[in-house]
Image (tube, grey):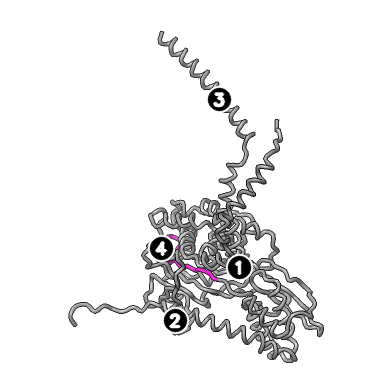
Amino acid sequence: MDRRQERETETQRKAAMAALALAPAEELKRLCTAAGISGEAEMLRGPETGLVSVRGRIGGGGAPFNFGEATVTRATVRLPGGEIGHAYALGRDKEKARLAAIADALWQDPTRRAEVEDKILAPLRAAQAEADATSRAETAATKVDFFTMVRGED
Amino acid sequence: MYVAVKGGEAAIANAHRLLADRRRGDRSVPALRLDQIVEQLALGIDRVMSEGSLYDRELAALAIMQSRGDLIEAIFLVRAYRTTLPRFGYTRPIDTAAMQVERRVSATYKDLPGGQLLGPTFDYTHRLLDPELANDPEVATPEQRDGDGQLMSRVSEILAHEGLIEADGELPEDHVTGDITREPLEFPLARDSRLQALSRGDEGFLLALGYSTQRGYGRSHPFVGEVRIGEVELELDVPELPFPVTLGRIRVTECQMVNQFKGSAKAPPQFTRGYGLVFGQSERKAMAMSLCDRALRAGELGEDITAPAQDEEFVISHSDNVQATGFVEHLKLPHYVDFQAELDLVRRMRSEHEKRNQTNDTEQREAAE
């Protein structure tokens, strides 16, 4: 695999892991059950909960500063085939992290990738896109339309 | 002599049992669920997350439930919980320009790109109590409108190209980002550590200080360049992956305060800035924070330090409500021995004082005779 292809795969895997991290826990659990993805993975790490220190930038784009912490749960699994999957997600849901790590590991197996994409990632992405579109449309409805009052005669 | 005194175990146990009962209240009233607190007391949750300095809605809800709605007690609980968890690292800085915006207003530009988006605001409500709410009325679903979906650049970028506004705050290249949760406070602070302290600072305290600058105690001629609320993505660099991993999204409030500045020996006339960034939908806090940030830059900008809001040690040392409540509230704990010693001292001083007065009286009488 050349470097360009490798890059592309990394970008896709990053996007897949992001979709898993953003997923509501109940939805991920439901999809995994429906797709028959659950056990048969060895836990290499966790699932464990810890903190990340969250950074912003002074003025929005200046030097970084820490402005608080957030709970994060992570997990690492190994499939019988040897693929290692990782998961990181905000919050404290250990089952969500475990399932996301398994999905990440399966995604790396070329024979299982399409299944993960179709049965897990596609529905998650669709739901997230719809929720975002709704939120944007609701916010857009509160946009102020200024108009000028005409004063006097012509 | 120090005499150890024990006792009160039974009283304490029974007091806590009574507390648990009073917290639950009338058993014929259904118990609150955490999701009810998360959904319906969302801004209380946001305050606990921002001052507890921990983004986790369910934990904040649990803390509010356990503290019977005493938000400072809830913040205390959250801060204590934080210390039980390991730290995985520092996120990449969030990009507020890429925010999924839920509210965005500017008091300086009417027609800024992306427009004025009011979002779910209390502004322009009449602040009249609505008795209807007690009957759980049907609530209409929000109106929707097609948005243009364009990214909303920060308002500071509009003034920037004229050179009339200072840039986003930079620190020297070799500066290591401060972390007040890891190192003790040492004054003067760099602006990054100061902002960290302000972001977790008590809303009421910062609000009062911000207000004091408006009333003339360190006046800074502020305008809200922009307030925006919405969700931003968090990313973390981890050794096991060749790319920064997305952790999810958090809601934040950002305030860009723009301040007219007549110039000083150190800086030309221009607009200077104060910055506010806090967890959740916490507009008042973000605005107060940005006013305090600007006031605390007095020294850096060559202004005279004349007011409490400009005094860094005063502001930052007293902005943490967990520290403040700890020290104030400890006064009610047993101080019997301290007080006995003070009592002896005051008795002795009083008797000396009376003796002195008697002597003085005698001397005066003798002088008069």
Name the mark nearer the viewer: 1 or 2.
Answer: 2
Helix or strand or loop: what does disc 4 sit on? helix
Mark 1 neighbour class, 10 Å CA radius: few under 14, some 14 to 19, many 20 or more: many
Give whichever of discs 4 and 2 has the lower sequence position: 4
* Residues at circles 3 and 2 in contact by the CB criterion of under 8 Å: no
Under mark 3, the amino acid is Met
Query: How many angstroms separate mark 1 from mark 4 (CA)?
Result: 40 Å
Under mark 4, the amino acid is Pro
Q: Chain of mark 4?
A: B
The tag on residue B291 is none
Residue drawn at point x = 39 percent, y = 62 percent? B129
The tag on residue B144 is 2
Query: How many angstroms separate mark 3 from mark 1 (CA)?
Result: 56 Å
Same subunit, tags 4 and 2: yes
Q: Which residue is mark 4?
A: B131
Pick the residue in front: A74 or B73.
Answer: B73
Q: Which residue is mark 1?
A: A54
Helix or strand or loop: what does disc 3 sit on? helix
Query: Does residue B239 sit above or below B331 in this rendering?
Result: below
List x then y, in percent, for residue B257. Answer: 44, 66
Q: Quadrant of the N terminus of chain A?
A: bottom right
Q: Find the magenta span and give its range.
A: B251-270
Residue farthest top in this picture: B369
Q: Chain of mark 3?
A: B
